[in-house]
Image (cartoon, rainbow, N blue to C red):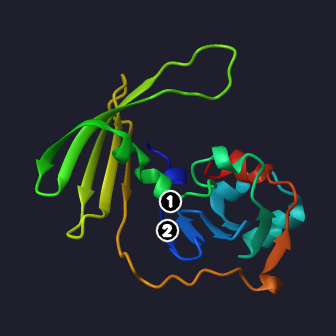
Amino acid sequence: MGSDLYSYTGVVNAETKNWEITGKEYVVRRVGTELYVQASGKTLETMILPPATTAHLAAGGWVHSRLPHGHELSVVFNDSFPWNQAKPATRATGMTRTGTRSFSGKLTVKDSRPSSRQRPSIDMRVGADLDEQGRFARISRDFLTKSPDQSIVFTFSDYGVQADIAAPPPSDVVEQDNTSFLTSTLLN
């Protein structure tokens, strides 16, 4: 969708559900219900943080925070991340085979968030590629809007690879109780 913010790679420990994602100017690590963040560049510049915390991040340190209130409504901070990224492929209708292990269908998403006005539905074309074991390898979502370049692609690979994800050393971490810097700047 044209933003480095949403371009990242990640690794997940399937047993613990701990994960880490790495973007161009940030790393977000979830260990249980705890979040650890590193940021630099423009991402760091736009974060609303105390000067000492900003300096700590600029020096390569980590910020520790709890999950933000309402994290279950978030895509990335949701407890089912990253597997929730596969939901469009499992909910699409009219799926047809487009290749040996490739499929395409359509999904209409209704915005069910509370609002004083009705929000329009969003139509998208969903593509799914499976690996030899039948697991998701690639999921694409192309929004059927006036702007044809609105697409999102998720790839899944390296199933079964060991992923040891733990909290950074305490000496590298500062606390940040106000989680608004997470939802205002980083993935949501």
Quarter of the view holding residue 104? top left
Asked if the residues shown at circle 1 and circle 2 are in contact, with their CB atoms under 8 angstroms apart, the answer is yes
Q: Is residue 28 above or below residue 96?
A: below
Residue 179 spot, x, y in % from top left? 80, 54
- The residue labelled by disc 2 is 10
The amino acid sitting under disc 1 is: Pro
Residue drawn 49% across the image and 47% down it: 3
Residue 80 spot, x, y in % from top left? 56, 57
- The residue labelled by disc 1 is 82
- Circle 2: element type: strand
Q: Is residue 75 above or below residue 82?
A: above
Q: The N terminus lies in which quarter of the figure?
A: top left
Q: Is residue 82 visible?
A: yes
Residue 173 spot, x, y in % from top left? 80, 77
Residue drawn 88% across the image and 66% down it: 52
The amino acid sitting under disc 2 is: Gly
Residue drawn 58% across the image and 70% down it: 17
Between 11 and 185, the one nearer to me in the picture = 11
- Farthest residue, direction left: 100
* Residue 166 relative to residue 155: left or right: right
Give the class, few, some or many, for how many residues have Cα within 10 Å of label 2's Cα (few <14, many ≥20).
Answer: some
Give the class, few, some or many, for how many residues have Cα within 10 Å of label 1's Cα (few <14, many ≥20).
Answer: some
Q: Is residue 7 visible?
A: no
